[in-house]
């Protein structure tokens, strides 16, 4: 059977067989084998077929990873054989490089989230009357830049925004929103689109360029919601320029911002600098309840109270993400705590 026929057979099989049944799904033996010296077109088609799509994070209790279209048995070995092959029958150098690059990308997609190549994820965010779609680019994870990935807590907080009752602000006071540790920008972009407000999304220099790109790419959905979004670099340890009242914000957002013992102090310090001292001011936080970071969460809560803030509402909820993988290599359940903080001394009393 020719290489092209093999690929067409594989494509037809993806429509015919259930993706939940490995025994009937297309196997690597249905794909072009190197000993047959398959064409560039045949290899490209096979490698497209082996693409692993990012899983859906819908937290409905039945969330499942998107099943690959080819039985995974032997796929890693198949991809490695392509990477190791000289592909000597292909005389075009750029074509060989393309095939090696595609095979390497497919292998990376099967190496866990830390080894995953750049991907785009699509998130459905409720506004109260409809859903909006936010598409985020996530670069490959390099060094320790965890802000280049989207996390379950961000998705949960973004979906909660339409349920938050924002207070009425006095005449002349503009709703200005600041996101700290914005990462890929899901929460801040959602806030601009759902609330129709101006949001300034911030993170460290190595994160901000991808953050800015995601804001630009979602400009249409932000504008349709009546919002404005900007980005900038904000280092929590930098206290050289304390914010004036004109530089303070009525709402501060933060999702999954605690990754080291130093973070609670730095985060609360930054909140204190940038939160408007007003009865209408709010801080919305969502934290995953990771056992390893329980001390940081406790420290954060104590420091927020010492700053003069208290929770007006709080709760727990469950989401899913693909960090670490769950059962069968799929999604992992993530329990999170969310809280809305206000200035204690300015809280309206009955």
Image (cartoon, rainbow, N blue to C red):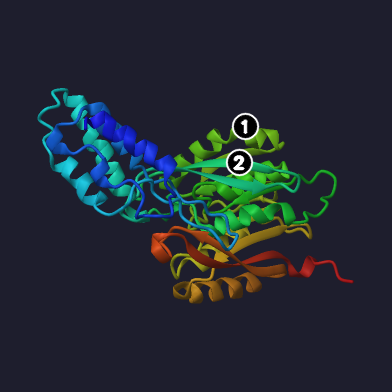
Counting other residues with Cα less than 10 Å from the Cα at mark 1, is it few (<14), some (14-19), or many (20 or more)?
Answer: some
Residue at horizontal 53 percent and vertical 54 percent from the top:
57
* Residue 78 horizontal/vertical position (percent): 21, 46
In this view, 140 is above or below 215: below
Q: Secondary structure at mark 1?
A: helix
Q: Nearer the viewer, residue 341 or 152?
A: 152
**Mark 1 or 2, which is nearer the eye?**
2
Whole-percent x, y for residue 335 in the image: 55, 68
**Residue 342, percent across and down?**
72, 64
Q: Secondary structure at mark 2?
A: strand
| Residue 318 position by quadrant | bottom right
Q: CA distance from mark 1 to mark 2?
A: 10 Å
Which mark, by number, is residue 133?
2
In the image, taking residue 315 as reference, residue 29 lies left or right, namely left
Q: Above or below — where is 207 with respect to 160?
A: above
> Is residue 142 in view from this perspective?
no
Q: Which mark is residue 220?
A: 1
**In this orientation, which residue lies closer to the viewer: 117 or 96?**
96
Q: Quadrant of the N terminus?
A: top left
Residue that extends furthest to the right in the rendered view of this protein = 350
Q: Position of residue 40 (x, y in %)?
A: 23, 28
Q: Name the quarter where the C terminus is drawn.
A: bottom right
Q: Residues within 10 Å of mark 2 (few under 14, many from 20)?
A: few
Residue 215 image-quadrant placement: top right
How many marks can you see? 2
Disc on the earlier residue, 1 or 2: 2
Q: Are marks 1 and 2 in contact (CB under 8 Å)?
A: no
Q: Is residue 221 visible?
A: yes
- Say if 96 sits above or below 83 in the image: above
């Amino acid at each position: 059977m020719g290489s092209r026929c093999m690929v067409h057979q594989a494509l037809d099989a993806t429509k015919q067989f259930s993706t939940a049944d490995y025994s009937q799904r297309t196997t690597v033996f249905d794909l072009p084998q190197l000993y047959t010296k398959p064409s560039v077109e045949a290899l490209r088609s096979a490698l497209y077929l082996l693409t692993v799509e990012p899983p859906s994070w819908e937290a409905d209790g039945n969330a499942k990873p998107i099943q690959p279209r080819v039985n995974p048995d032997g796929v890693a070995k198949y991809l490695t054989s392509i990477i190791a092959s000289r592909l000597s029958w292909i005389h075009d150098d750029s074509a060989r490089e393309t095939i090696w690059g595609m095979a390497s990308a497919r292998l990376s997609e099967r190496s866990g989230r830390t080894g995953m190549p750049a991907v785009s994820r699509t998130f459905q965010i409720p506004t109260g009357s409809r859903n909006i779609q936010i598409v985020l680019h996530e670069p490959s994870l390099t060094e320790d830049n965890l802000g280049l990935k989207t996390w379950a807590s961000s998705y949960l907080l973004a979906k909660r925004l339409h349920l938050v009752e924002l207070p009425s602000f006095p005449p002349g006071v503009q709703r200005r929103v600041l996101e700290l540790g914005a990462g890929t920008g899901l929460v801040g972009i959602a806030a601009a689109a759902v609330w129709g407000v101006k949001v300034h999304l911030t993170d460290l220099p190595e994160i901000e360029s991808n953050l800015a790109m995601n804001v630009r790419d979602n400009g249409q959905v932000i504008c349709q919601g009546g919002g404005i979004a900007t980005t900038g670099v904000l280092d929590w340890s930098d206290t050289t320029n304390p914010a004036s009242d004109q530089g303070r914000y009525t709402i501060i957002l933060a999702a999954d911002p605690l990754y080291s013992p130093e973070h609670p102090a730095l985060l609360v310090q930054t909140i204190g600098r940038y939160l408007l001292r007003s009865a209408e001011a709010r801080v919305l936080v969502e934290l995953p309840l990771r056992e390893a970071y329980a001390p940081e969460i406790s420290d954060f809560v104590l420091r927020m109270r010492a700053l003069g803030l208290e929770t007006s509402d709080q709760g727990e909820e469950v989401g899913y993400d693909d960090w670490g993988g769950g059962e069968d290599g799929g999604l992992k359940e993530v329990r999170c705590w969310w809280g809305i903080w206000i200035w204690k001394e300015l809280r309206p009393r009955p």
